[in-house]
Structures are given as structure tokens and as C-alpha cells.
Amino acid sequence: MSTTYENAPTKSVEMNGTNFVFREIGKKGGIPLVLLHHLTAVLEDWDPRVVDGLAAKHHVIVFDNRGVGGSGGSTPTTVEEMARDAVAFIGALGFGKVDLLGFSLGGFVSQVIAQQQPGLVRKIILAGTGPAGGEGIVNVAAVLQDAFGKAAATNKHPKHFLFFTRTSNGQAAADDFLGRLKERTKDLDAPVSNETIQAQLAAIQAWGQGDAATLETVQHPVLVANGDDDVMVPPSNSFELARRLPNAQLSIFPDAGHGGIFQHHAAFVQQALVFLQQ
């Protein structure tokens, strides 16, 4: 199997007539780690330092859920449907037990998977995410629109404003992160469609109006991580997740935003590896 995310081949698997595209790296065997991604993201949006770092010890699978990037079908408008599709994808690969790393929207999906299919999941990492009904989640569409406006006005990438703080350290980290995303130059994923973005925003809006009362039923070990200045999913949501989940630990990165796990990728990978090995 490929030793780095940069040269991992893009594969596909069919489930109920829909093709899901994915990549996998690391040594096969043991409990695989499945990564679930954020609003607008495709395979190219995972930080290769995070994927490679995790794959040093684990079989890592990265995929596009239904309707996203190179995967077929239409993107659902609810997190619950996205969770069912993710479970179907995991089943299509033949896994009976997995660990999950859910970032942002992927963290919402991971929470639902853990509640609907608890036996499928061993451990969960929730990064840059929050519980249903969490503070500020209903504002994501407005935050996204504002960032795209600022990006156009300054000739910068929207992730400069969405994922990183405005400090010199934060903006330097943004440049480094965006540079890493360009390391792969061949066999690239299809970009996300406008239809997918609108469906994902509808799902996020509904999640932001939801109820997290059932989170207390999640008995899995959970690592919650975020930056201390997240404009997309305010860090208060990470504290709320840690409070509600019975078996959670919390990591907050300094001078970091929504992309805190990418800015502090070395520290995050180390924390994640320790957590998964416990």
C-alpha cells in the first residue's frame, strides 16, 4: 500500500449503485481509522501531514461521501442521511469495527454514526465540531459568505479567514497549510459542486437547530480537539462536547482557529496516536 497520501491512488467502491471514491494508506490490519471531512471538502483538502502522521501507526481511509467530489449520487440535506451513507461505505469495504476522525461537518456525522451504530465504532476523534444545537452553528453559511467576500477583496484563499486566526502566526500557518494541499499534482479529485455545498449547508443549518440530549448515550472514548479562536464552530462547542460525552478528553490549541489540527499538526497527530493506542 502507498506510504504517503501524496501518491495514494484514488480507488472506488460501489454500494447500492453508487460509487464512493476513497484513498487508503498505512499498514492494513487492526482497527482502521476512517476520516470524515468538512463542508466543501474533497479528498485534496486533507492535510497530508495529518494523514501521513496517522498512517504511520494505522490503516487510514479517506473518502468522499455521497455526491461529494468524485463520488456518485446526490448529497443528502441531513446529517443523519450522511451518516447512513458513511456506514454503507464502511460496510462496502468490509469493516466490522472502525475508529472515526470527524472534522467539522464530519464531526456531526461521526456523532450520529456513534449513536446509530455504536457497535461499529471503537474510538472517535471530534475536531473543529460541535453538538447538535451548538452555539453559532446556524451561522456557518453567513460566516462562509463573509470569508469568500474577504478572500476576493484580498486575493487570498477563503481558508485564510475560515480556518486560521488573523495573527501573523495564524496567517503563516494558513500559507503553510495551503502549500501542503498542493503537494499532490496527479490523480486529483473532482471539485465540490454548488449543489453539494447547498445541501451541506442545509444539513448544517438543521444540525444547528437540533438537540444534543442523546449525546450522553455515547460511551465510546472520544478525543475532542479545536483551536481557541474558531469562527466557524466556536470553541465553546468543544467544551460542551467534552461536558456531555461521558468518556471524553479535550485538547484546545493556542492561537488557532477552525483548522487548529492542521496548524498544530505535529502535536495533534501525537495526541491522536496516543489516544488511539490507549
Image: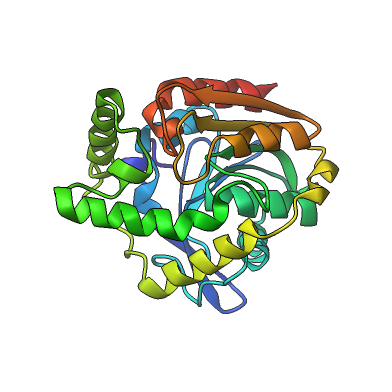
How are the residues colored? rainbow
Q: Position of residue 263 (x, y in %)?
A: 37, 29
Residue furthest out toward the right: 217
* Relative to 128, 186 lies left or right: left
Front-lying residue, 82 or 72: 82
Front-lying residue, 35 or 26: 35
Residue drawn at the location 70% of the way across and 32% of the way down: 242
Name the quadrant of the C terminus.
top right
Residue 110 visible in the displayed image: yes
1 to 200, vertically: above or below: above
Q: Where is residue 6 in the image (x, y as percent from the top left)?
A: 31, 42
* Relative to 220, 151 lies left or right: left
Q: Where is residue 106 in the image (x, y as percent from the top left)?
A: 56, 51
Residue drawn at the location 73% of the way across and 45% of the way down: 121
Residue drawn at the location 36% of the way across and 71% of the way down: 193
* Relative to 87, 146 lies left or right: left
Residue drawn at the location 42% of the way across and 58% of the way down: 142
